[in-house]
Image: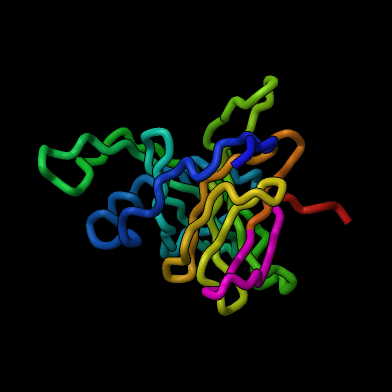
Amino acid sequence: MPPTDRFVISFAASPPQETLPYGRWEETLGEHFRAACEQIDTEGEDLGEPGDVAWFPDRTYAGRTYVPAVARTTGGYELFGFVSFTASAPEEGASETGAPYDFDAHADFTAELAEENPDWKLDLNDEVIGTWRGEQANVADVTLVWGVPLIPGGAIVTAELANLAVDQCELVDDRFTLIAPDNYRQDFLEIKLWSKRGQELAAESLYVEDE
């Protein structure tokens, strides 16, 4: 193949390695996420108490694993964020990763809910987790994206930058997580939902244009 003129980091994150959190592992992650929620600057809003946490597929990038989460509150808001950690090296001959350590968590809130936006086809959350330096001093925002489709029939979700697929994730219980470069050479991510047969069902930008 000839050289590409769209030289950018692609498919850099490991695909999901575990099932959605449950049991003691879910409790551990939940403690870190709720602690992060307590540190949110509420901007004077009474968010209420968080409800059950919905977890999303794990993705690992640059040695850290990210597990996104969302939770509704009794005040009618949605909390969103992630818990990240590093896993120790597995024991010799073991197929599983080692014990997690160096936990970190981030959380924020929004009043924009999917049920109040019937035009949405994907409910998306995103957070910049790093940078990637490209050619000619161009820099991309390495961005964690997670969400759910709001229409039926989807099987896989991709992240595209200037029509170039830079990550993808199969739906797990109708949830997905992506890690992809964004805001690179004035190009911005577009998230697309696909059927099993490869039919494009929806496409959403991470950016909301002012009306």
Question: For the point 70% across and 68% down, which residue is it?
Answer: 120
Question: For the point 65% across and 28% down, which residue is it?
Answer: 139
Give the residues in magenta: 192-206
Which quarter of the rendering shows the N terminus?
top right
Residue that lies at the very extreme toward the top in this rendered image: 137
Residue 83: where, in percent of width, then height? 41, 45
Residue 127: where, in percent of width, then height? 57, 43
- Compared with 202, 38 (above or below) is above
Question: For the point 61% across and 58% down, which residue is it?
Answer: 124
Is residue 127 covered in magenta?
no
Magenta segment main secondary structure: strand
Q: How many marks?
A: 0
- Compared with 143, 123 (above or below) is below
Residue 81: where, in percent of width, then height? 50, 49
Which quarter of the rendering shows the C terminus?
bottom right
Residue that lies at the very extreme toward the right in this rendered image: 211
Left or right of 64? Residue 101 is left
Residue that lies at the very extreme toward the front in this rendered image: 1
Residue 195: where, in percent of width, then height? 56, 73
Left or right of 29? Residue 199 is right
